[in-house]
């Protein structure tokens, strides 16, 4: 019984050491780069994401899982009083920079005015409208919209958008931001019902900087402990293994 328990401890220590040795591997896209506090976690567990090389003092959004393309996603504007801003939010934030566009239809009893807005990849939009002002997209929150030079009172307005989002939005509450030097730290929670497998963690800032790395989700992984605690467990397991497997002295018994 003791031997079996000790083997489990030694095996666990080996797994912990392996996880620690590869926890900080990252893959970058655009200017940013991110690392994870652990590259493997169970559903419902937390992972700390650390980013460098992002824009200075920019909001950050974090997606988990594969990219998901949304097409012809309609957003009627409920209150069209005044000149705006008129805003709404996509269904799958954060938004992949460079993938966003929306079509605006403004209808009255006698007239329909349409216009198009295309993403420049840096948080700004290009439009063919001569009436739109302050049009924008926020990649991190998924919010977008515009204002107008003439009031839209009593008009019907619909924004229809196409963009690339992510399977899960795991941006922490409060919308983390980068420091003036372009770094950030944010703790995300792995969705509780997420199936085992490898998933991209993608961080995006409001200026369009983006980076991703891979997280392995496995429901057999115990909750990750602080690094200091993990190292202590490793040292104890190694010490216990050394004591158990060392050669024991032979005790001679006199036979009469």
Image (tube, grey):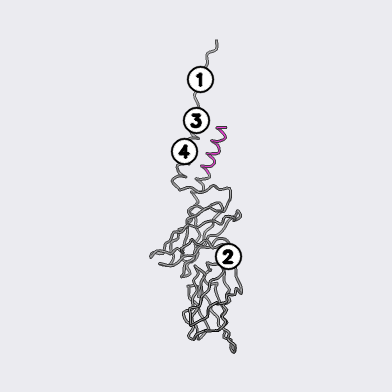
- Image coords of residue 147 (percent x, y): 48, 80
User: How many numbered marks, from 0 up?
Assistant: 4
**Disc nearest the viewer among 2 and 1:** 2
| Residue 12, magenta (yes or no) | yes
| Contact, mark 4 vs mark 1 (Cβ under 8 Å) | no
Q: Which residue is mark 2?
A: 67
Quadrant of the image containing the N terminus: top right
Specify the segment rendered in magenta.
1-14
Q: Spatial distance from mark 4 to mark 1, Cα to Cα?
A: 28 Å
Q: Which residue is mark 3?
A: 246
At 55% across and 53% down in the image, what residue appears? 44
**Disc nearest the viewer among 4 and 1:** 4
Q: Spatial distance from mark 1 to mark 3, Cα to Cα?
A: 16 Å
The tag earlier along the polypeptide, 4 or 3, is 4
Q: Spatial distance from mark 3 to mark 2, Cα to Cα?
A: 53 Å
Q: Which mark is residue 251?
A: 1
The tag earlier along the polypeptide, 1 or 3, is 3
Q: Which mark is residue 51?
A: none
Q: Spatial distance from mark 2 to mark 1, Cα to Cα?
A: 67 Å
Q: Which residue is mark 4?
A: 236
| Residue 100, magenta (yes or no) | no
- Please, what secondary structure does the residue beneath circle 2 have? strand
């Amino acid at each position: 019984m003791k031997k079996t328990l000790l083997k489990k401890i030694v095996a666990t220590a080996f797994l912990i050491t392996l996880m620690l040795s590869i926890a900080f591997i990252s893959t970058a896209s655009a200017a940013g780069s991110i690392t994870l506090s652990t590259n493997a976690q169970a559903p419902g567990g937390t992972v700390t994401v650390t980013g460098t090389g992002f824009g200075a003092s920019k909001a950050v959004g974090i997606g988990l899982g594969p990219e998901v393309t949304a097409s012809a996603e309609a957003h009627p504007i409920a209150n069209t009083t005044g000149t705006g801003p008129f805003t709404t939010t996509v269904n799958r934030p954060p938004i992949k920079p460079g993938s966003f566009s929306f079509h605006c239809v403004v209808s009255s009893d006698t007239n329909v005015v349409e216009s198009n807005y295309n993403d420049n990849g840096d948080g700004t939009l290009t439009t063919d409208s001569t009436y739109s002002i302050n049009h924008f997209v926020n990649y991190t929150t998924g919010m977008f919209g515009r204002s107008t030079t003439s009031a839209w009172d009593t008009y019907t307005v619909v924004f229809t958008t196409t963009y690339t989002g992510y399977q899960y939005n795991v941006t922490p509450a409060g919308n983390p931001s980068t420091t003036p030097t372009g770094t950030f730290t944010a703790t995300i929670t792995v969705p509780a019902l997420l199936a085992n497998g490898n998933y991209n963690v993608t961080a995006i800032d409001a200026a369009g900087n983006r980076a991703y790395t891979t997280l392995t989700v496995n429901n057999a992984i115990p909750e990750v402990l602080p690094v200091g605690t993990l190292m202590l467990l490793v040292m104890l397991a190694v010490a216990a293994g050394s004591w158990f497997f060392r050669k024991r002295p032979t005790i001679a018994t006199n036979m009469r």
